[in-house]
Amino acid sequence: MSAPTQSQQIKQNFLNHPYTQQASRFATGQVNALDAELNRYPLLRNLEQQTKVPKAYGVLALAASAVVLIFFNMFGLAQPVSNLIGWALPAYLSVQAIESPQSNDDKQWLTYWVVFGSLNLAESLGVRAILYWVPMYFVFKTLFTIWLMLPATRGAETLYYHVLRPVIGNVKQKSQQTTGQTNPFAKESASAGFNPAGTTAPSSFERE
């Protein structure tokens, strides 16, 4: 048997192996599920029509590029790419939430931005020490940011209600001890001072 024929036989045996076929079916199913999820966004559908590149493959290619850039810190792009991941999709979904009539998504993304902003503030105060003591910090930060934003995990809500809210509540409660108010998150009445809801400036997003 010649070398090319033997090589083709090994390749064919590998492709016909039950584990290979099972893995192929699993990968195809995951790509189809991702494509169905991405089909919800008109922007991605338009890009697919213009570039002729399937949106699932485009997103996977961008994700793989981001992993390489962050993991190896190529061209010093680990920090900006990590921040872009935490900003781009949440910003797009936040605009959609503003324009939607429901209020649940508004609360979800407001919570995310509070947590994301707090994380970046803490990072900016000690970034040199963090980079010195935590190897591959931006890899962990990116994974953590994805955990914060994903609807399946809603990590931002978990972190807010278990960490930020108790801290803010304790600080506000100490400042309100003289008023006798028991709930530190209770909204003040309009007569107590400035009421933002009472301003008459028209909203830029007001629907006709």
Image (cartoon, rainbow, N blue to C red):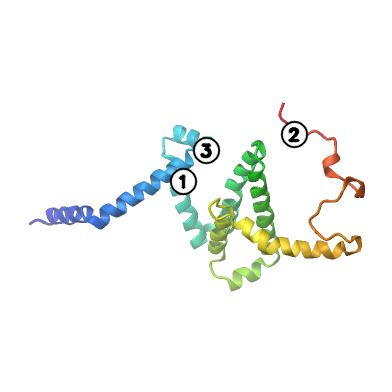
Judge by depth and name the residue closer to the eye, 16 or 8: 16
Q: Earlier in the sequence, mark 1 or mark 2?
A: 1
Going by the numbered disc 1, the residue's amino acid type is Val
Q: Which quarter of the picture shows residue 157?
A: bottom right
Judge by depth and name the residue closer to the eye, 45 or 185: 185
Tell me the CA gap for discs 1 and 2.
33 Å
- The answer to whether residue 76 of the structure is visible from this angle is no
Residue reaching furthest to the left: 1
Q: Position of residue 72 (x, y in %)?
A: 49, 62
Q: Which quadrant of the rendered structure holds the C terminus?
A: top right
Do the residues bearing badges 1 and 3 touch, measured as CB atoms within 8 Å? Answer: no
Q: Name the residue beneath numbered marker 2.
A: 204
Who's the residue at 52% across and 35% down the image? 42
- The answer to whether residue 13 of the structure is visible from this angle is yes
Who's the residue at 60% across and 43% down the image? 93
In the image, residue 22 above or below residue 131: above
Q: Secondary structure at mark 2?
A: loop
Q: Which mark is residue 59?
A: 1
Q: Earlier in the sequence, mark 2 or mark 3?
A: 3
Q: Position of residue 36 (x, y in %)?
A: 44, 41
Is disc 1 surrounded by few (<14), some (14 to 19) or many (20+) residues within 10 Å?
some
